[in-house]
Amino acid sequence: MRRRIKSRRMNRDAVWDAMKYAGSFAAVMVIGSLLILWQGENPVAAMRYILQGAFGSIRNLGNTLRWITPCILTGIAAAVAFKSGVMNLGIEGQLYFGAYAAALFGFYVRLPRPLHVTGCLLAAGTAGMVFALLPAVMKLVFHVNEMITTLMLNYIAVLMTEYLTYVVMGISAAGDSLALSTPAIQDTARLTNLISKTNASTGIFIAVGLVAATCLVYRYTVVGYELKQVGENRSFARIGGVNVTKTFLAIFLLSGFAAGLCGSIEVQGTYGKFTASFSNNLGWDGIMIAMIAGNNPLMVLAVATLWGMLKAGSLHMERMCDVNRLTVLLIQALFVLFVTVDYKKLAGTLKRKAVAG
């Protein structure tokens, strides 16, 4: 009987979620069409240009894969934290430290190709974990809200890696920060290119593998069960014998590791070195992707694919017509807003006010 009731409730929730996503998508499509019309262009033509930019040729497909890869990794980094009730907003900073560690390892260390590639990935993941450890310790020891510390540490990470790049390059701080970069990593540290004349690399397989590993951990391991329990109800988890402090640290470390991996793949697969201000807000993209996906790893994969397609396609759209690609960013942000609204609670509040009035 209980199973039947639970199954019905899950089915109702699934239907409600489907309606919410469909309604949100329809709303942003209408708003987006109006914005494009306001700019004097045809919305259908603009969408066609986006699809052409994403999938119109093998080269375009390669550029789309290039953007999908970091979107998956930062989305997983955010989803792992949010699913367990940890507001890690420091993914951007952890990504920067991971990228910097990979660049140094790739330049200074000399190893055979398989070991060199793996070493860069592990160095970056470790750097991301170390930087994620700071807000975790501040939360556990000093009870500082992790939203504040992770948010502020983003700026510290960007500025610190920029300063360290000055040190590595041995130049004055008066130079142009956008032109700053470390020396190029060795060829043995580069990821294998999948499509010539694009930045699509084997990093896409690492990203998809991380999604699969995350799903398996949550579904079949004790660690995954504890991670979910801490997110759903920490008091209940503590009563059930879960070491909440240890699990809280593990959540931050896992999230930081995924963010660091993203930084490494950007260096090894795209830039070939660490470049100041390279990220293009990938950390924030991951946060929005996780929110849309409801912190579900498989949904992160789907949403990140759409997100990467829009990133690649919007550049082509801007070249082909007079629609600014910032229009796509605005549509993405609105979709996040519409999806994250709790319409059930909103409807209940409005109903109570109507009755009271």
Image (spheres, rainbow, N blue to C red):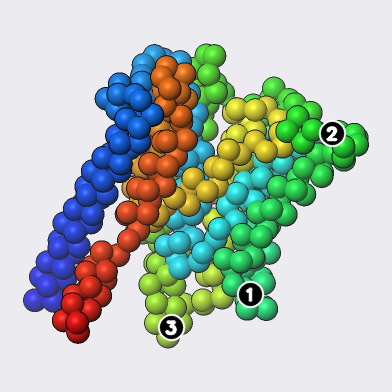
Residue 308, located in which quarter of the rendered image? top left
Which residue in the structure is indicated by mark 2? 175
Nearest the viewer among 144 and 315 is: 315
Q: Residue at x 34, y 24 (%)?
A: 41
Q: Amino acid at mark 1?
A: Val
Residue count near mark 1 (Cα–Cα under 10 Å), binned few <14, some 14–19, many ≥20: some
Please tell me whether mark 3 sits on a helix, a strand or a loop: helix
Nearest the viewer among 45 and 91 is: 45
Mark 2 or 1 closer to N-term? 1
Between marks 1 and 3 in the image, the one whose residue lies nearer the viewer = 1
Q: Residue at x 65, y 36 (%)?
A: 278
Q: CA distance from mark 2 to mark 1?
A: 36 Å
Which residue in the structure is indicated by mark 1? 144
Which residue in the structure is indicated by mark 3? 235
Q: Residue at x 51, y 38 (%)?
A: 70
Q: CA distance from mark 2 to mark 3?
A: 52 Å
The numbered mark at residue 221 is: none
Please tell me whether mark 1 sits on a helix, a strand or a loop: loop
Nearest the viewer among 176 and 15 is: 176
